[in-house]
Image (spheres, grey):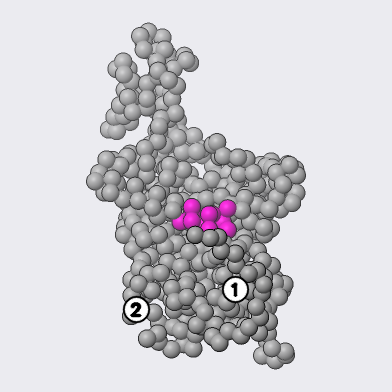
Amino acid sequence: MTMTKKNNSKDYGFILYTIDDLVPEDHLVRKLESAIDWCFIYPLVADLYSSHGRKSIDPVVLFKMIFIDKLFGIGSMRKTVEEIKINLAYRWFLGLAIDDDVPNYSTWSQNYIRRYHDSDIFDKIFTHIIDEAIDNGFIDTSCVFMDSTHQKACANKRKSHNEEVELIKKIYEDDLLEEINEVRKEHNKRPIKDLKKEEVIFDELTGEEIEVVEKKNIKVSDTDPECGNFHKGEKEECFAYSHQTACDKNGFILAYDTILANIHDSSSFYGVYRDLNERYPITNIALDAGYKTPSVLKEIFDDGHTPLLPYTRPKTKTGHFKKHEYSYIRKEDIYICPNGNTLKYSTTDRKGYSLYRADKKDCAACPFKDRCTSSSSKTITRHVWEDYKERCEEIRHTPLWKELYPLRKQTIERDFAIAKENHCLRYTRLKGLNKNRHNTGIIFASLNLKKIAIWRWKDPQKRIYSKDNTLYQ
């Protein structure tokens, strides 16, 4: 058989086809177009446009452009515009003829700056898409999965400075202080006074009063001062944003929030959780070990939900007794050590930990002292909300936990992996918390929309909208 050589000359001819004929029937853009009625954007942005003046670019086209950017993992509006110019499928999705001009890449930027930056349009789009999933029966909130992931900021980690910042009072601190003083009162201890307010500031979004109780020096980026210094375990230290996220059993993102990456998961948990709790009927909630704190567990149990959390290894020295080897006698409020000696209540500190101390004489004569403590007497701490952690540990041994908790890897963890690998969540080119929160909303809305589109495409009865808003046949 002889080798074939194709003539490399370019023939200029006519193609007697429409764009609709050239877009494959199973292309993702067809699935996206048939998933929802994109006209829902018009009433959401109506108050952002003037009733007179020159005509603007169609807002549906603008938002479809940003969805193309995220859904197909392009990650640059300039590059997205260049792709739309030569990609017939993208043109079909936007409703542009082959000779129509594609909006300039700066058009989106200017519209964002002038119209969308200070609006809640991104939240409304995210909510509308998740409502579509609810209406189609795709959402299953019998178990909700929560976690956070970091996104590298557009900031050089070598360009930074130390700065004194304000630490605000945590959501649960007033309830905790009340509980602490009740315990101290039972043991005839003087109550602990509330921390003196350094000053009062107001939330820029809600206008609510926020108490500043402490100030602290932290590392701040010179390039993007609104991001946070992320340093966790073996991961590389960098400036980043963190996305607190919740999804359902089918992997649909239900709620999210973008925060500084130097805020711990157990602190950023409450905002997303309370929004989630108000909107959806939750039964079980699966979290990773970072949320295993008494305050988080109390919040979940008090709401009547079941927390599913993993085993956490005790932080004790090798060869020493673990905390569970000391028996707590609730009725007498004492601990019994492995040698049978008693550890009695001493005090309760401001963080909510009650201290139980052994007698120095008992420890001096104890044959197990080397396995117990290196100090003159053993001290054990017990949080005033420790009962919630113990209830959580009991749930860990139930069939419910063994059935639901392992699903984290195919729900929330898979969502993060797909978003980072395919939809531009690994790092950001944008600077500022507000911009990155809007960007994250579009990324998560894209994940939900893609899932809706694929699921609906499998059922021809649910392919609702075509280019002219008529039913597909």
The structure residue drawn at horizontal position 40% and vertical position 49%, both measured from the top left corner, is: 409
User: In the image as oriented, which residue stretches furthest toward the left?
Assistant: 399
Residue named by callout 1:
87
The structure residue drawn at horizontal position 58% and vertical position 44%, both measured from the top left corner, is: 195
The structure residue drawn at horizontal position 61% and vertical position 44%, both measured from the top left corner, is: 230
Numbered circle sitting on residue 443: none
Is 90 situated left or right of 459 in this image?
Answer: right
Q: Earlier in the sequence, mark 1 or mark 2?
A: 1
Q: Secondary structure at mark 1?
A: loop
Examine the image and state in which quarter residue 340 appears.
top left
Q: CA distance from mark 1 to mark 2?
A: 26 Å
Check disc 2 and give the amino acid type. Pro
Q: Nearer the viewer, residue 189 or 254?
A: 254
Is 120 situated left or right of 320 in this image?
Answer: right
Residue 17 in magenta stretch = no
Q: Nearer the viewer, residue 149 or 17?
A: 17
Q: Is residue 162 visible?
A: yes
Check disc 1 and give the amino acid type. Asn
Q: Is residue 12 above or below residue 402?
A: below
The structure residue drawn at horizontal position 46% and vertical position 56%, both measured from the top left corner, is: 415
Q: Nearer the viewer, residue 161 or 349?
A: 161
| Magenta-drawn segment | 415-426
Could you tell me residue 254's position as x and y percent?
44, 63
Mark 1–mark 2 CB contact (< 8 Å): no
How would you rate the neighbour count of disc 1 (Cα within 10 Å): few for under 14, some for 14-19, many for 20 or more?
few
Residue named by callout 2:
460
